[in-house]
Amino acid sequence: MSGFILETEGLTKEFRGFVAVKNVSLKVRRGSTHALIGPNGAGKTTCFNLLTKFLPPSAGRIVYNGRDITREKPSSIARLGLVRSFQISAVFPHLSVLENVRIALQRQRGFSFDFWRAEGVLAEYNDRAAELLEAVGLQEYVAHTAAELPYGRKRALELATTLALDPAMLLLDEPTAGMGHEDVGRIMELIGRVAKDRTVLMVEHNMTVVSTLAHTITVLARGEVLAEGDYATVSKNPDVIQAYMGTANA
């Protein structure tokens, strides 16, 4: 099996004459944490939407685990183990934290969201749900409704519901956006734990998060790959400094 779990070749997306992503060839190494960064308007979100099948490419191909998924649907690639956090997660604000994770576990096993099933039947998911909640630091919030959680804890719950799908590769779209310093540190630690036994690809603006977690960084600018390497390499690249590192709040 290839050392790369996700590869793109010439990935391109055009919107009525505007090329948002141009000829992006990306290789994500299996078991690594890979960050996709760049200034505002660089094409990061569009690229991420192409990878997760929320947008069809204008050209190019996407290969996941040796399988061409260029024309697959988001639900299909999720079943293959490629899951986008905070998009596919099922978080219901008026259900408890435990119930949210339990519902996600039902989905992972191929069942529909059977709200009508007897409590005793659904209880079979409790142990695994409790394990996931402990993994994301929410064991003390089991009985709280999702709506009661502060923002950072809610993001942790969303990650727990995603992990319930048992993904081989997890795609995180700005996981620390809008968080205070304390929550950023908590989520960063959580991502580090999660990444120990799976591949993570993330779009992230916070360079402390990127420099701490990412083994490889791909820098986009104007829809094209500008540079790639570890943090020490890309942070010293003059083109990157001009296009990204020197741009405040990029």
Image: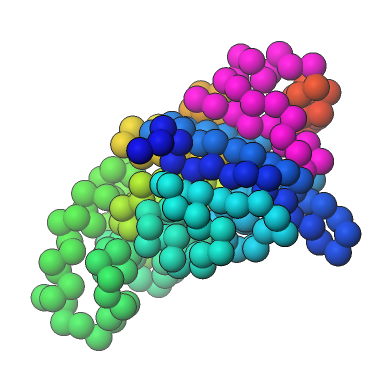
Please provide the residue range marked out in magenta.
Answer: 215-238
**Residue pictured at 65% horizontal, 63% vertical:** 56
The magenta stretch spans residue 183: no
In percent of width and height, residue 214 lies at: 51, 28
Residue 175 at least partly seen? no
Residue 228 position, x and y percent, is 64, 26
Q: Residue furthest right?
A: 17
Does 39 sit above or below residue 112?
Answer: above
- 45 vs 89, left or right, is right
Count of numbered labels shown in the rendering: 0
| 222 inside magenta stretch | yes
Q: Image height check: is 175 above or below 128?
A: above
Quadrant of the image for the N terminus? Answer: top left
Q: Nearer the viewer, residue 68 or 43?
A: 68
Instruction: Classify residue 226 by image quadrant.
Output: top right
| Residue in the picture at 81% in, 61% down | 15
Query: Image quadrant of residue 117?
Result: bottom left
Q: Which quadrant of the rendered structure holds the C terminus?
A: top right
Q: Quadrant of residue 3?
A: top left
Of residue 247 and residue 56, the one placed in the foreground of this image is 56
Q: Note whether 204 is above or below 152 in the view shown.
A: above
Measured as percent of width and height from the top left, residue 110 is found at 28, 71
Residue found farthest to the bottom: 116
